[in-house]
Amino acid sequence: MSDATPMNVTGTELDRLLRESDGPVLLDLWAPWCAPCRAIAPALESVARAYDGRASVVKVNIDESPEVARRLGVSSIPTLIVFDRGAEALRLVGVQSESALSRALDEVIGAQTA
């Protein structure tokens, strides 16, 4: 079993990761005061373990990096964005189940191998 967990990053770190990543990146835009954001955390942790080596799961606290939310046009949290080769592939808004997050990553991973 993998001990991979979602990585907390800043805007600058996110930009670097998106440029350098070979696989999909699942980005969670969240804030500590957001109850739905806290509710989704266990699903994100599970997905990070399940997709270790195939996808990266990262979190950006919009209170600490508000420029990321502005740049990505995020007006509601949690917002989850899957990036493929640095470009936004799909976006989910609101609390999502582990299976919904897995389907989103599988869709992008499948598109990469097609």
Image: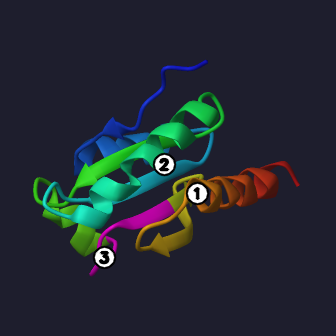
- Which of the 4 image quarters holds residue 29? bottom left
Q: Quadrant of the N terminus?
A: top right
Identity, as a three-letter code, of the amino acid under mark 2: Ala
Alpha carbon of mark 1 to alpha carbon of mark 3: how far? 18 Å
Q: Are marks 1 and 3 in contact (CB under 8 Å)?
A: no
10 Å crowding of disc 1: few (<14), some (14-19), many (20+): many
Q: Which residues are magenta?
A: 72-81
Alpha carbon of mark 2 to alpha carbon of mark 1: how far? 8 Å
Above-or-below relation of 113 to 1: below
Q: Secondary structure at mark 3?
A: loop
Q: Are marks 2 and 1 in contact (CB under 8 Å)?
A: yes
- Which of the 4 image quarters holds residue 72? bottom left
Residue drawn at 19 percent across, 60 percent down:
62
The disc placed on residue 43 is 2
Identity, as a three-letter code, of the amino acid under mark 1: Leu
Q: Secondary structure at mark 1?
A: helix
| Lateral position of residue 16 relative to residue 92, left or right | left
10 Å crowding of disc 3: few (<14), some (14-19), many (20+): some
Q: Is residue 80 magenta?
A: yes
Q: Earlier in the sequence, mark 2 or mark 3?
A: 2
Q: Earlier in the sequence, mark 1 or mark 3?
A: 3
Find disc 1 in the rendering and name its residue.
Answer: 101
Identity, as a three-letter code, of the amino acid under mark 3: Val
Alpha carbon of mark 2 to alpha carbon of mark 3: how far? 21 Å
